[in-house]
Image: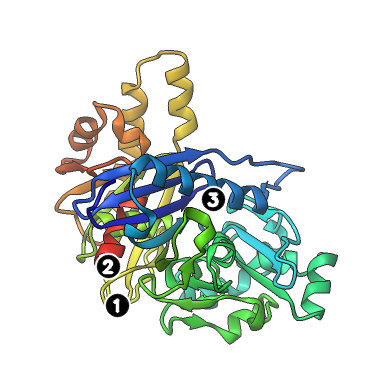
Amino acid sequence: MNQKPAVLILDVGTTTIKAFVFDQELHVLGQAKLEPKKTRPQSGFVEQDPLELLALAKQVLVQAVAIAKIAPAEILSFGITNQRETVIAWDRATGEPLYPAIVWEDTRTAKTCAALERFTGFVREKTGLPIDPYFSATKVSWLLQQPPVIHALREKTLCVGTVDSWILWNLSAEHLHATDYTNASRTLLFNIKTLSWDSELLKLFAVPAEILPKAQPSAANFGSLNTDIVGALIPIRALCGDQQASQYAAGVNVGATKVTLGTGIFISQIIGSNFQIRPPFFTTLVPNEKQPWYALEQKINESGSRIQELLDKKMDLAPLLKEFSEDVNIYLKKLPRQPAELVIDGGITQAPALADILAETTGLPVRRQIIPDGTPLGMAKLLFSRD
């Protein structure tokens, strides 16, 4: 058995659910992954099964701890990172989900968002985000019109939250209904200046405050991982959205810039303690020691499926990597600060030529993250910063 201090991380993504055990030197002692299904029942609808997300999460946690050959009692703490903006409604009395998870890619609320367009400036000034089906608020509004959800609301047993909240409620011994500031910051319901659910936003989107989770800092106490999951009662000490965890791994000094090249390409840069609106970027929150700091973020394009297609055909990746690099460079030029370096993570960074092509295209030093999975790495850093 490994006797070094270790932490356990669960990463509930859209296409993969992973678990990692890290030691204090940030070495991966054990990891496991499984792939959840995603369904498209009609045009614009993208859904996942909340019970499958939970079942796979439990399985990968057990597998990762077994592979790490570590006694569960030796694990210092546990953290959850997740796909953001996806929403789930469940009944706290029965524990049952009331509707499939509505995934961040879902566009069923496009007409609702268009009807609210005149409020975009008002919403952006509070949230850093435009009104868009991508974010959670109109998904929640839509759920609140479905009969099982209406019934639970009347019975005062309704819980609604992002994926982290659903997983936390189920895995924590205390059944906590909580989230962190980074996930809350992607809902359009959370004021990222006051760090609280905003009464005016809740009214605009017709969302009752009492159904939402308690919002806390990313590094906070979120109860304990139930003993029956991996065999020990482990403190849950961090929650964080996936892109913000990846940014935390790359750095939180002003100007720290990272690019994730995975299922999609994401770019983000830390702008510090002062709120700014800088189109075309979204303004969001990233964990920091005391108060979260603001970051600019943008999803550039899809990438994973395009790379996989070339790999399946055994074709040269270089032209596509060059295209991705040029796309990244367009957004780099729009950032408020020229980065000292680019930190890159994500599965595509395993392509040997990528770092050189990106450096040549952007004229910047490019540093690969120590493992491609920057998201759980950030969570490990966050947990070890507390323990």
Label 2 CA crowd tier, 10 Å (few <14, some 14–19, many 20+): many
Q: CA distance from mark 2 to mark 1?
A: 7 Å
Left or right: where does residue 310 sit relative to residue 69? right
Identified at 71% across, 48% down, the residue is 45
- Mark nearest the camera among 3 and 2 is 3
Q: CA distance from mark 3 to mark 1?
A: 39 Å
Left or right: where does residue 135 sit relative to residue 204? left
Q: Could you tell me if residue 251 is visible in this image?
A: yes
Left or right: where does residue 30 sit relative to residue 129? left
Identified at 67% across, 47% down, the residue is 46
Residue 274: numbered disc: 1
C-beta proximity under 8 Å, tags 3 and 2: no
**Secondary-structure class at tag 1:** loop
Residue 228 vertical placement versus 122 (above, below): above
C-beta proximity under 8 Å, tags 2 and 1: yes
The picture places residue 302, in percent across and down from the top left corner, at 47, 39
The picture places residue 122, in percent across and down from the top left corner, at 53, 78
Residue 270 vertical placement versus 364 (above, below): below
| Count of numbered labels shown in the rendering | 3
Identified at 24% across, 67% down, the residue is 385
Label 3 CA crowd tier, 10 Å (few <14, some 14–19, many 20+): some
Residue 271: numbered disc: 2
**Which residue is outermost to the top?**
314
Q: Which of disc 2 and disc 3 is earlier in sequence? A: 3
Q: Amino acid at mark 3?
A: Lys
Which residue is under mark 3? 58
Q: Which of disc 1 and disc 3 is earlier in sequence? A: 3
